[in-house]
Image: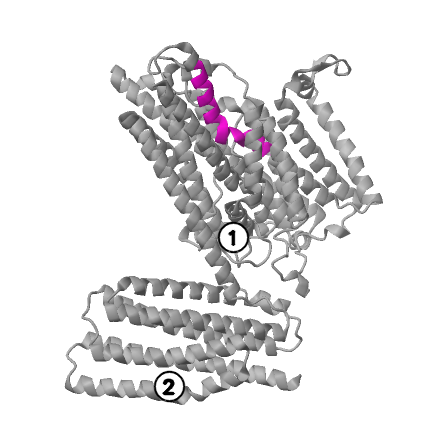
C-alpha cells in the first residue's frame, strides 16, 4: 500500500510540471502586456528581463507555500489518505481548468482556481467524514479554516474594484499633467513621474524580494542592530522618502544630461518586478500542493501508522521548501514563457481590450455592455455639464491624442498604447501587490494587473464611441470567466474528490489518464488551429502600401478565394448527390472562414487607405472594388451551401439523377472557370486571363440551357416542388456566382493591363 501513495506523489510531481506550463501560459499576461503593448523594448529583451524576474522570484517564494498547506483547511483534522486525495483532486482540476482558459485565450486567476479547488475538495471530504461520524453540519468549521478562507476570497474580490478604480484615477491625473505629447513635457514633470514610479518599483522589489528571504532576518549594526525586515517595517516613511528623493534626482539627471528614455527604464524595471512578483506570489498555485503532498508522504512514511489513521498535524507547522524544487520550477516557468503559443494568445486578449487605436475587436457587444456604455455616457455628460465650458475645453486639450497622420504609424508594429500608460500599468499594479503582500493577503495578480490595465484604458479614452461596447463586452466576458473559474474549480474538484473516495486507486488512474487525453487533444487542436489561422491570415490580406503591391495582393486573394470556392462547390455537389450532411457542414465551415476574412479586410479598410503611399485614388478604388466582388462571390456560395444543407437536414427527397447530372455539368463548367483563373493568377499571365474571359458566354449559355430544360421537365414530368425549387435556386445562384467571378477577373484584367501599359 505504501507504494500506492508513492506513485500518487510521483503523479503529483508530473502534474506539477503540467500545472506550471498551463499556469505560466495564462499568467504571462500579468507582466508582459505593458511592455509588449507599448513596444518600448524589443520582444527579446522583454523576455530576458521577465526570465530573470521569474528566476529570482521562484527562489524567494518559499514563504507563500503555507497557503497550500493550511491556508484553506485545518490539516490536523484530516488523515494522510484524505489529504493525498484532496491534493490529487486539486492538481487534476487545476490543469483542466487553466488549459481550458488558455485554449480560449482568456486570462483567469491561478490564485482563485487553487483557493476554490482546495476549498471544494476540503469541504467534500469534510462532509464525507461528517456523514460517517454522524455529526451535524456545524462541525464543518472544525475542518475548514473559515476565517483565513473568507479573508482570502474577500481580498481577491476587493482587488478587482480597487485595481480598476486606482488605475483609472492615477492614469487620469498623470495624463492631465503630462498629456499625450510627452516629449514636450518639462524635464521637472517627467523627473517627478520617474522618481515616484521608480521609487514604487524599488520598494516593491524590496518587499517581494528581500523581505521574503532568510537574509531579511540578519541584523546589521548600521541599522541599529535591527534586521532588514524590522528596519523596512519600522522606518517605512524614512525609507520611502529617501527612495523618492534619490530616484527623483537620478531621473532628472538621466532626462537632462543623457539620452535615456525614463519611461523605457520604468517599463524595463517594472516588467522585471512584476515577473518577480508573479513567481514569488503565484508559484504556490502550481507547486504548493505537490510539495505539501511530498512533505506529507515523508512524514507518514516515517510514522509507521496506517495512511487512513495518520493525522496530518505536520502540515500545521512551517516547513521550508527545498531550494532545488524552487529552482526546477523556475526553469520550467522560464521555458514555458519562451515557447508557449497559448501565452501569446492570452496576452493578445489584454492588448486588444486596451488598444488606444483602431483594432480588430475580438468580442461582440451584448445588451449589458450597451446598457453600461449608455449609462456611463449619460453620467459623463452630466458631470461634463457641471464644468464650465472654458475648463472643459482645457481638460479636453490635455487629453488630445497624438494623431497618427503618417503612413508608418498604420502598421501592425504600431504600439497599442504609449509608454506612459504602460509605465502606470506596471507601477500601480506593483504598488497594489506590495500593499496586499504587507497585509499578508495572497491576492490575484491577474485580477490586479488586468483591471489596472482596463482602468487606465478607460481614463485614456481608449474606449471611445467606436469601440466602447466591444471593449466593455470583452471585460465583462473576462470577469464572467473569473466567476466561472471559482464556481467550476469548487464544483469539479469536489466531484473528482468524491470519485476518488468511491473508486480509490482505480478512479485516480482513470481520471489521470483522462486528463492526459483531454490536455493532449487540446494541445493538438490548438496547434492545428494556429496553423490554420496562419494560413487564413496569409491567404486574404491587405497590407501593401503601393499600387503594384495592392495588385499583387489582389492576385493572391483572388486565387485563394477561387481555390476555396472550388473546394466548397465540390463538397456541395458531393453532399447533395449522396445525401451526406457532413460534407455540407464542412462546406459551411469553409464559407464561414471566408466570410470572416473578408469582414476583417472590410473592417480594416480605414487603416488600409491611411497607410497607402499612393497619392491618387486608383489603388484604393481597385482594392474596394476587388473586395466587393469577392464578397459577392462568397455570398453566392454561402447561399448555395445553406439551401442545400437545409434541404438535406430537413430530410427532403433526393434530387433526381438527371438533376444531379445537371449539377455535375455545372460544377464542371465552374471548375473550368475557377481552375483556369487559378492557373492564370498563379502564373501571373494576362494572356491566360483573357482566354478565361473568352469562355464567359459559353458558360452562361450552358447554364441557361439547363434552366430551360428544367422548365420543360417541370411542365410535363416533375412532381416534387421542393426539388424543383432547390434545383432552380442552385442553377440561378450558380449563374450569379459565375458572373461575379467573371466581373472580378475583368476588373483585375483591365487594371493590370492599364498599369502595364503605363510602365
Q: Are marks 2 and 1 in contact (CB under 8 Å)?
A: no
Q: Position of residue 390 (x, y in %)?
A: 68, 54
Q: Along the horizontal axis of the image, is 497 left or right of 435?
A: left
Image: 529 above or below 91: below
Q: Position of residue 287 (x, y in %)?
A: 49, 29
Q: Assess whether residue 603 is covered by the magenta stretch.
A: no
Q: Neighbour class for label 2 at 10 Å: few (<14), some, many (≥20)?
A: some
Q: Is residue 440 visible?
A: no
Could you tell me which residue is drawn at 51 percent across and 77 percent down?
Answer: 681
Image: 572 above or below 447: below
Q: Along the horizontal axis of the image, is 175 left or right of 571?
A: right
Could you tell me which residue is drawn at 48 percent across and 73 percent down?
Answer: 559
Q: Secondary structure at mark 2?
A: helix
Name the magenta segment's main secondary structure: helix
Q: How many marks?
A: 2
Q: Residue furthest top?
A: 304
Q: Neighbour class for label 1 at 10 Å: few (<14), some, many (≥20)?
A: few
Q: Position of residue 9 (x, y in %)?
A: 42, 25
Q: Quadrant of the C terminus?
A: bottom right
Q: Secondary structure at mark 1?
A: helix
Span shown in magenta: 276-299
Please give the residue where the numbered disc 2 appears in the rendered image.
Answer: 699
Q: Assess whether residue 285 is covered by the magenta stretch.
A: yes
Q: Position of residue 742 (x, y in %)?
A: 45, 82
Q: Quadrant of the N terminus?
A: top left
Please give the residue where the numbered disc 1 appears in the rendered image.
Answer: 377
Could you tell me which residue is drawn at 25 percent across and 76 percent down?
Answer: 660
Q: Nearer the viewer, mark 2 or mark 1?
A: 2
Could you tell me which residue is drawn at 71 percent across and 33 percent down?
Answer: 199
Determine which quarter of the picture holds residue 435.
top right
Amino acid at each position: 500500500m505504501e507504494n500506492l501513495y508513492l506513485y500518487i506523489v510521483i503523479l503529483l510531481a508530473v502534474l506539477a510540471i503540467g500545472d506550471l506550463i498551463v499556469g505560466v501560459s495564462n499568467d504571462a499576461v500579468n507582466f508582459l502586456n505593458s511592455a509588449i503593448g507599448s513596444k518600448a523594448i524589443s520582444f527579446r529583451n522583454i523576455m530576458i528581463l521577465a526570465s530573470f524576474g521569474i528566476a529570482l522570484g521562484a527562489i524567494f517564494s518559499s514563504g507563500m507555500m503555507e497557503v497550500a498547506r493550511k491556508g484553506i483547511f485545518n490539516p490536523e483534522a484530516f488523515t494522510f489518505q484524505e489529504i493525498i486525495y484532496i491534493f490529487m483532486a486539486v492538481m487534476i482540476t487545476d490543469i483542466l481548468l487553466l488549459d481550458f482558459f488558455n485554449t480560449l485565450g482568456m486570462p483567469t486567476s491561478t490564485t482563485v482556481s487553487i483557493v476554490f479547488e482546495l476549498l471544494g475538495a476540503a469541504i467534500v471530504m469534510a462532509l464525507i467524514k461528517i456523514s460517517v461520524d454522524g455529526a451535524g453540519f456545524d462541525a464543518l468549521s472544525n475542518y475548514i479554516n473559515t476565517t483565513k478562507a473568507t479573508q482570502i476570497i474577500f481580498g481577491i474580490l476587493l482587488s478587482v474594484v480597487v485595481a480598476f478604480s486606482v488605475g483609472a484615477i492615477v492614469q487620469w491625473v498623470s495624463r492631465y499633467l503630462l498629456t499625450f505629447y510627452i516629449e514636450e513635457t518639462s524635464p521637472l514633470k517627467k523627473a517627478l513621474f520617474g522618481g515616484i514610479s521608480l521609487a514604487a518599483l524599488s520598494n516593491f522589489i524590496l518587499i517581494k524580494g528581500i523581505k521574503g528571504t532568510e537574509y531579511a532576518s540578519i541584523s546589521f549594526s548600521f541599522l541599529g542592530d535591527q534586521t532588514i525586515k524590522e528596519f523596512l517595517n519600522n522606518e517605512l516613511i524614512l525609507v520611502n522618502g529617501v527612495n523618492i528623493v534619490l530616484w527623483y534626482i537620478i531621473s532628472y539627471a538621466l532626462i537632462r544630461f543623457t539620452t535615456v528614455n525614463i519611461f523605457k527604464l520604468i517599463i524595463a524595471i517594472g516588467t522585471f518586478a512584476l515577473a518577480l512578483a508573479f513567481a514569488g506570489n503565484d508559484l504556490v498555485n502550481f507547486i504548493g500542493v505537490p510539495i505539501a503532498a511530498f512533505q506529507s508522504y515523508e512524514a507518514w512514511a516515517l510514522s509507521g501508522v496506517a495512511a487512513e489513521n495518520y493525522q496530518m498535524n505536520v502540515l500545521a507547522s512551517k516547513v521550508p521548501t527545498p531550494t532545488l524544487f524552487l529552482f526546477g520550477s523556475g526553469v520550467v516557468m522560464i521555458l514555458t514563457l519562451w515557447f508557449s503559443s497559448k501565452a501569446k494568445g492570452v496576452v493578445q486578449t489584454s492588448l486588444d481590450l486596451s488598444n488606444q487605436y483602431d483594432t480588430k475587436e475580438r468580442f461582440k457587444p451584448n445588451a449589458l455592455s450597451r446598457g453600461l456604455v449608455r449609462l456611463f455616457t449619460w453620467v459623463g455628460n452630466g458631470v461634463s455639464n457641471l464644468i464650465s465650458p472654458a475648463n472643459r475645453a482645457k481638460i479636453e486639450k490635455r487629453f488630445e491624442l497624438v494623431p497618427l497622420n503618417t503612413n508608418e504609424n498604420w502598421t501592425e508594429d504600431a504600439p497599442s498604447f504609449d509608454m506612459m500608460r504602460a509605465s502606470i500599468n506596471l507601477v500601480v499594479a506593483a504598488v497594489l501587490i506590495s500593499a496586499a503582500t504587507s497585509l499578508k493577503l495572497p491576492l490575484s495578480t491577474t485580477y490586479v494587473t488586468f483591471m489596472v490595465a482596463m482602468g487606465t484604458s478607460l481614463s485614456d479614452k481608449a474606449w471611445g464611441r467606436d469601440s466602447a461596447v466591444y471593449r466593455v463586452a470583452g471585460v465583462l466576458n473576462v470577469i464572467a470567466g473569473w466567476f466561472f473559474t471559482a464556481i467550476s474549480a469548487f464544483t469539479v474538484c469536489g466531484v473528482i474528490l468524491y470519485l476518488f473516495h468511491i473508486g480509490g486507486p482505480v478512479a485516480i488512474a482513470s481520471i489521470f489518464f483522462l486528463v492526459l487525453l483531454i490536455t493532449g487533444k487540446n494541445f493538438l487542436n490548438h496547434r492545428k488551429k494556429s496553423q490554420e489561422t496562419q494560413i487564413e491570415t496569409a491567404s486574404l490580406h491587405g497590407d501593401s502600401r503601393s499600387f503594384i503591391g495592392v495588385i499583387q495582393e489582389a492576385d493572391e486573394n483572388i486565387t485563394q478565394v477561387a481555390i476555396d470556392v472550388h473546394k466548397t462547390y465540390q463538397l456541395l455537389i458531393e453532399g447533395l448527390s449522396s445525401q451526406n450532411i457532413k460534407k455540407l457542414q464542412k462546406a459551411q465551415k469553409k464559407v464561414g472562414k471566408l466570410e470572416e476574412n473578408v469582414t476583417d479586410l472590410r473592417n480594416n479598410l480605414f487603416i488600409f487607405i491611411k497607410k497607402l503611399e499612393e497619392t491618387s485614388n486608383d489603388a484604393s478604388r481597385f482594392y474596394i472594388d476587388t473586395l466587393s466582388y469577392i464578397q459577392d462571390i462568397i455570398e453566392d456560395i454561402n447561399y448555395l451551401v445553406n439551401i442545400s444543407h437545409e434541404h438535406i437536414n430537413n430530410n427532403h427527397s433526393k434530387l433526381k439523377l438527371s438533376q444531379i447530372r445537371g449539377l455535375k455539368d455545372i460544377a464542371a463548367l465552374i471548375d473550368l472557370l475557377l481552375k483556369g483563373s487559378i492557373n492564370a493568377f498563379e502564373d501571373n499571365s494576362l494572356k491566360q486571363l483573357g482566354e478565361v474571359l473568352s469562355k464567359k458566354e459559353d458558360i452562361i449559355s450552358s447554364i441557361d440551357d439547363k434552366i430551360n430544360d428544367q422548365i420543360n421537365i417541370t411542365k410535363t414530368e416533375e412532381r416534387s416542388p421542393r426539388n424543383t425549387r432547390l434545383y432552380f435556386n442552385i442553377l440561378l445562384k450558380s449563374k450569379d456566382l459565375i458572373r461575379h467571378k467573371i466581373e472580378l477577373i475583368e476588373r483585375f484584367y483591365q487594371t493590370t493591363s492599364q498599369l502595364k501599359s503605363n510602365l
